[in-house]
Image (cartoon, rainbow, N blue to C red):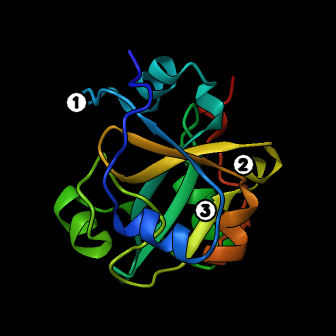
Amino acid sequence: MAKKGHHVSETPATQMLRQAGVAFTEHPYDYVDRGGTAESARQLGVAEHAVVKTLVMQDQDARPLVVLMHGDRQVSTKNLARQIGAKKVEPCTPEVAQRHSGYQVGGTSPFGLRKVVPVYVEAGILALPVIYINGGRRGYLVGLAPQVLVTLLAARPVEAIDPASAT
């Protein structure tokens, strides 16, 4: 069951959001290992499509990048690579992702990353009225307007949904 009225301590992500004056809501939930966005959406009573996963990937030269994708969809790395002008894009190992982001896998937020990296957002996310995205620790999402991804992170919209994952 989602925790109501439970305050979560500051993270680099929430510090960045507060410093930028971004309005957001806090949504703690009971983290379930390998539960993913389906579990957080279920506990919070929101559509999984509005829960955005933060994926740390790398190009053919091992340069990191972040991809923001609907919780109920998969990234087509082939489509993504073509759109960003890379030969290849692949997920980072958990250890490499943590080194680039500064966050534990399962608690990765695109806000307050350890390194400045390019951020790409699935274009459909920007059309949603509100999104729920990791707030910088496992079991903690923040709700905010998707446009913040563009204004605060300079996220570039891409069409990177794997057609096999679309329902």
Q: Check the image and report above or below for 6 versus 62.
A: above
Q: Residues within 10 Å of mark 1 (few under 14, many from 20)?
A: few
Residue 86 x, y percent position in the rendering: 55, 77
Q: Amino acid at mark 1?
A: Asp
Q: Residues within 10 Å of mark 2 (few under 14, many from 20)?
A: many
- Determine the secondary structure under disc 2: helix
Q: CA distance from mark 3 to mark 2?
A: 15 Å
- Which callout, 3 or 2, points at the residue further toward the start of the chain? 3
In the figure, is residue 121 to the left or right of 117?
A: right
The mark lying in front, picked from 3 and 1, is: 1
Residue 113 is marked as none
Instruction: Answer with the quarter of the image where residue 4 lies.
Output: top left
In the figure, is residue 10 to the left or right of 152?
A: left
Q: CA distance from mark 1 to mark 2?
A: 25 Å
Residue 68 x, y percent position in the rendering: 56, 55
**Quadrant holding the C terminus:** top right
- Which callout, 1 or 2, points at the residue further toward the start of the chain? 1
Residue 161 x, y percent position in the rendering: 65, 45
Residue 80 is marked as 3
Q: Amino acid at mark 2?
A: Ile
Residue 32 x, y percent position in the rendering: 26, 26
Q: Are marks 3 and 2 in contact (CB under 8 Å)?
A: no
Residue identifier under label 1: 33
Q: Amino acid at mark 3?
A: Leu
Q: Are marks 1 and 2 in contact (CB under 8 Å)?
A: no
Residue located 16% across and 62% down the image: 95
